[in-house]
Image (cartoon, grey):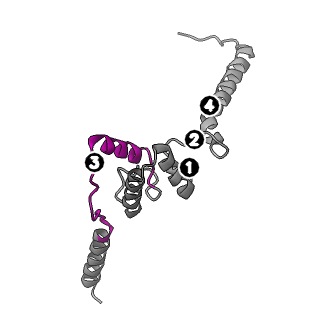
Amino acid sequence: MRPALVCLLLLAGFAGAAQAQAVRDATPLEFRDVAEERRFHGLVAELRCVMCQNQSLADSNAQIAHDLRREVFDLMREGRSDDEIREFLVARYGEFVLYRPRFGGHTWALWLAPGLLLLVGGVVIVRIVRARGRQPIPPEEEQEW
């Protein structure tokens, strides 16, 4: 096969794959009032997309993010509270789905590690400074200016 034909076929394949990634929600969400819309946007902004990992449900265009936004909307319509919706998603996907995980058995290290690292770093710095302070200053050699 000719190299130009191979390149053309590859480009066509990549273009099709890229277009297949675009996801559109078939039916847009219709909110009853502004308060419901604010509540929904507040919830999806603090929930993490389980596929994208560093995007919220509000920011992600992944298919699972669309599905989870629809799920959150349906749970809201069922009359569940924000805490119940979070619990439902944590039960399915784990604490990872929360941008601000709760302090608990599996997340204590996540919450305490930064403080412990600062404390250990401070102790190390203090010990280094004290050790250098105890060393005698070497006598200066005669210098000509």
- Quarter of the figure with the N terminus: bottom left
- Name the residue beneath numbered marker 1: 95
Q: Amino acid at mark 3?
A: Arg
Q: Is residue 54 left or right of residue 1?
A: right
Q: Residues within 10 Å of mark 4 (few under 14, many from 20)?
A: few
Q: Quadrant of residue 114?
A: top right
Comes first in the chain, label 2 or label 1:
1
- Name the residue beneath numbered marker 3: 32
Q: Are marks 2 and 4 in contact (CB under 8 Å)?
A: no
Return the x and y of residue 115 as percentages of the image width and height.
Answer: 62, 31
Q: Is residue 38 left or right of residue 91?
A: left
Q: Farthest residue toward the bottom? A: 1
Secondary structure beneath dot 3 equals: loop
Q: Are marks 2 and 3 in contact (CB under 8 Å)?
A: no
Choose mark 4 or mark 1, whichever is in front: 1
First to last magenta residue range: 20-49
Comes first in the chain, label 2 or label 3:
3
Q: Give the CA distance from mark 1 to mark 3.
A: 30 Å
Q: Are marks 2 and 1 in contact (CB under 8 Å)?
A: yes
Return the x and y of residue 56 as percentages of the image width and height.
Answer: 41, 49
Q: Give the CA distance from mark 4 to mark 3.
A: 44 Å
Q: Is residue 41 above or below residue 30?
A: above
